[in-house]
Image (spheres, rainbow, N blue to C red):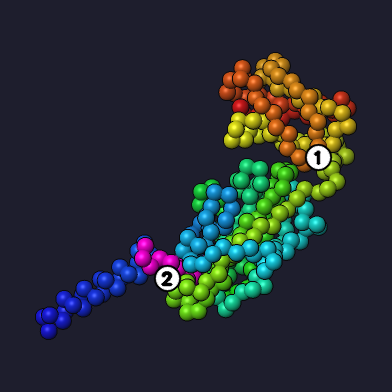
């Protein structure tokens, strides 16, 4: 009896270690069980992210022909501040499926708009690395479609991309040997017609990219060059450049080396209309 107790204890400890999430020998084998309630963040295949293959076996497949995201807006075009109904549907799903998606500004690859939970039983929202994710839950992994809402950002930011990855679980569900991983992207665009209002003909957004270049997105097609000017906070003109603006396209401007870090005013002048915005360089 004395010999049996130590043997049982050793077996229990060994079994616990084998099934432990961080055990590198078995994290993939048991991923379908460990992540049945939703994947860790950052598994959508979006820029800077991995996919479900970090935990599940199998290769990454193109999911564009086997899945879709319906969007309640016209022509997959968004209007700032508007809330839309969306549904992710898998056409090749099995009895056990999982997914994760993220909505990003395609220029800065940062969160864009706001994900809204509409089905707390089958979906959940998680956050990580300054990004928000929609995932399946344990109850939702028997679904082949999931509903949610999204509110567009308060202003146009250019194309917006919904990156998603999904797993079609193989049998038996206790391991991942038969799993198939798919990724795809849904793009939401600004309207083809200029987004002009009766009170304001010209509008634009501006920001610095990772290469310290000034990016300008305007709503206007200029028939001739438009004047872009940079003023310091006291109103002194520091730099000017002619730009050939195209609606919803990015114009990149190299920042002059004589401009030190600080707050500046960026002005666009079309001759008939002028708009100024503040930026930190």
- Sooner in the amino-acid sequence: mark 1 or mark 2: 2
Q: Are discs 1 and 2 less than 8 Å apart at CB?
A: no
* Residue at the image point whose x is 67% and y is 60% from the top: 149
Instruction: Give the percent coordinates (x, y) of residue 172.
Output: 47, 79
**Camera sees residue 254:** yes
* Residue at the image point whose x is 56% and y is 66% from the top: 181
Quadrant of the frame with the N terminus: bottom left
Q: Height in image: 35 above or below 231?
A: below
Q: Is residue 25 left or right of residue 247?
A: left
Instruction: Give the percent coordinates (x, y) of residue 137.
Output: 53, 68
* Residue at the image point whose x is 65% and y is 47% from the top: 105
Q: Main secondary structure of the magenta part?
A: loop
Quadrant of the frame with the C terminus: top right
* Residue at the image point whose x is 29% and y is 73% from the top: 15
Q: Residue furthest left?
A: 2
Instruction: Please say whether residue 232 is one of the residues in the magenta stretch.
Output: no
Quarter of image, res 20:
bottom left
Q: Height in image: 207 above or below 228?
A: below
Which of 152/168 is in front? Answer: 168
> What residue is disc 2 on?
30
Instruction: Give the percent coordinates (x, y) of residue 200.
Output: 84, 36
Which residue range is magenta in the image? 24-38
Which of 137/190 is in front? Answer: 190
**Res. 268 mark:** none
> What residue is disc 1 on?
247
| Element class at badge 2 | loop
Instruction: Please say whether residue 30 is one of the residues in the magenta stretch.
Output: yes
């Amino acid at each position: 009896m004395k010999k049996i107790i130590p043997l049982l204890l050793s077996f229990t400890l060994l079994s616990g270690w084998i099934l432990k999430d961080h055990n590198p020998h078995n994290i993939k084998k048991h991923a379908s069980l460990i992540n049945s309630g939703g994947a860790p963040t950052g598994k959508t295949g979006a820029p800077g992210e991995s996919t479900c293959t970090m935990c599940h076996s199998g290769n990454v497949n193109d999911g564009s022909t086997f899945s879709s995201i319906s969007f309640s807006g016209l022509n997959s075009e968004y209007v700032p501040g508007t809330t839309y109904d969306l549904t992710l549907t898998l056409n090749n799903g099995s009895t056990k499926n999982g997914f994760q998606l993220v909505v990003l500004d395609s220029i800065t690859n940062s969160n864009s708009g706001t994900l809204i939970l509409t089905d707390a039983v089958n979906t959940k929202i998680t956050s990580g690395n300054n990004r928000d994710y929609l995932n399946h839950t344990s109850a939702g992994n028997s679904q082949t479609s999931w509903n949610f809402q999204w509110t567009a950002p308060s202003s146009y930011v250019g194309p917006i991309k919904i990156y998603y990855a999904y797993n079609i679980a193989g049998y038996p569900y206790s391991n991942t040997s038969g799993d198939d991983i798919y990724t795809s992207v849904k793009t939401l665009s600004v309207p083809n017609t200029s987004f002009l209002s009766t009170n304001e003909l010209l509008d634009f957004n501006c920001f610095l990219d990772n290469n310290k270049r000034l990016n300008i997105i305007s709503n206007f097609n200029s028939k001739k060059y438009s004047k872009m000017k940079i003023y310091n906070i006291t109103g002194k003109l520091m730099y000017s450049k002619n730009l050939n603006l195209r609606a919803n396209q990015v114009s990149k401007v190299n920042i002059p080396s004589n401009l030190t870090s600080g707050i500046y005013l960026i002005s666009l002048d079309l001759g008939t209309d002028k708009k100024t915005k503040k930026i930190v360089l």
